[in-house]
């Protein structure tokens, strides 16, 4: 055991699963932003 | 929920996911780094008076086995205590028991007694040699104590060097 170094505990599969989840969450948040943008534009068109 | 708060919450969510992307890419990039520990993001929902205000991104934490970590700390402490005990016992053995005759205090007392006796008859050859003899014994005791200290210091130093090289 002298001079040995422990390897990283990263599970690549788990990390990519996290990546996919984060991607989906990002899309959903972006969709919310787009919807808010559209609705605000409708409001502005009502004023003008 | 107003349109503005929806927009604000969504942008907060985007910021949170951006932080998560940073963590995930860091984890993937260091997948083969020796000794690397997975970093996990922490998040919490924020509400004020029942009104949703979005998500709060907390500081990232390392994903370590708490039980294993505490066990390692405990073992290190036990080993360190054992080392200290060995070193101190070696020095204690040289110091001797106070009042038993072989410790520094007793040797010094012997020398003082010899001088006191010599004071009453300074020309007594026997007393003179007795004083010299007890002084030599005292010097010997101090020397062996000093040697024991040096040996233990050296041993501790060697152990430290060996540990710090890996």
Image: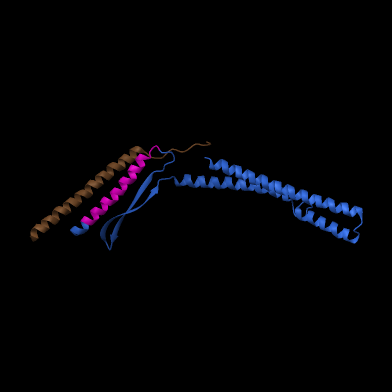
Residue occupying the point 60% across, 42% down: B158
Residue occupying the point 17% across, 50% down: A34
Q: Farthest residue to the front: give it.
A: B123
> Residue B126: x and y, percent?
91, 52
Q: Quadrant of the C terminus of chain A?
A: bottom left
> Residue B150: x and y, percent?
67, 46
Judge whether residue B18 is colored magenta.
yes
Q: Is residue B108 left or right of residue B7?
A: right
Residue occupying the point 33% across, 41% down: A15
**In front of the other: B33 or B60:** B33
Colour that chain A carries in the picture: brown
> Residue B130: x and y, percent?
87, 52
Q: Is residue B152 in sight in this rendering?
A: yes
> Residue B26: x and y, percent?
35, 43
Image color mode? by chain
- Quarter of the image for residue B12 reads bottom left
Segment tinted magenta in the rendering = B7-32
Judge whether residue B126 is colored magenta.
no
Magenta stretch, main secondary structure class: helix
Image: B1 above or below B85: below
Image: A7 above or below B148: above
Instruction: Please state the total of marks drawn on the protein image.
Output: 0
Colour that chain B carries in the picture: blue
Q: Is residue B86 in sight in this rendering?
A: no
Residue occupying the point 8% across, 59% down: A46
């Amino acid at each position: 055991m002298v001079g040995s170094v422990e390897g990283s505990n990263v599970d690549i599969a788990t990390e990519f699963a996290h990546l996919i989840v984060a991607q989906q969450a990002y899309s959903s948040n972006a969709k919310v932003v787009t919807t808010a943008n559209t609705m605000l534009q409708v409001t502005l068109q009502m004023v003008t | 929920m107003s349109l503005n708060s929806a927009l604000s919450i969504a942008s907060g969510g985007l910021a949170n996911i951006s932080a998560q992307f940073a963590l995930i890419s860091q984890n993937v990039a260091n997948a083969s780094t020796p000794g690397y520990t997975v970093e996990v993001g922490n998040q919490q929902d924020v509400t004020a008076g029942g009104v949703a205000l979005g998500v709060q991104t907390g500081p990232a934490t390392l994903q370590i086995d708490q039980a294993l970590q505490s066990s390692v700390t405990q073992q290190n402490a036990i080993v360190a205590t054992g080392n200290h005990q060995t070193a101190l016992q070696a020095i204690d053995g040289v110091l001797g028991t106070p009042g038993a005759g072989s410790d520094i205090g007793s040797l010094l007392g012997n020398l003082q007694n010899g001088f006191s006796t010599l004071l009453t008859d300074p020309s007594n050859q026997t007393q003179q040699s007795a004083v010299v003899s007890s002084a030599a014994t005292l010097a010997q005791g101090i020397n062996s104590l000093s040697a024991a200290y040096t040996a233990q210091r050296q041993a501790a130093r060697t152990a430290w060097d060996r540990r710090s090289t890996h």
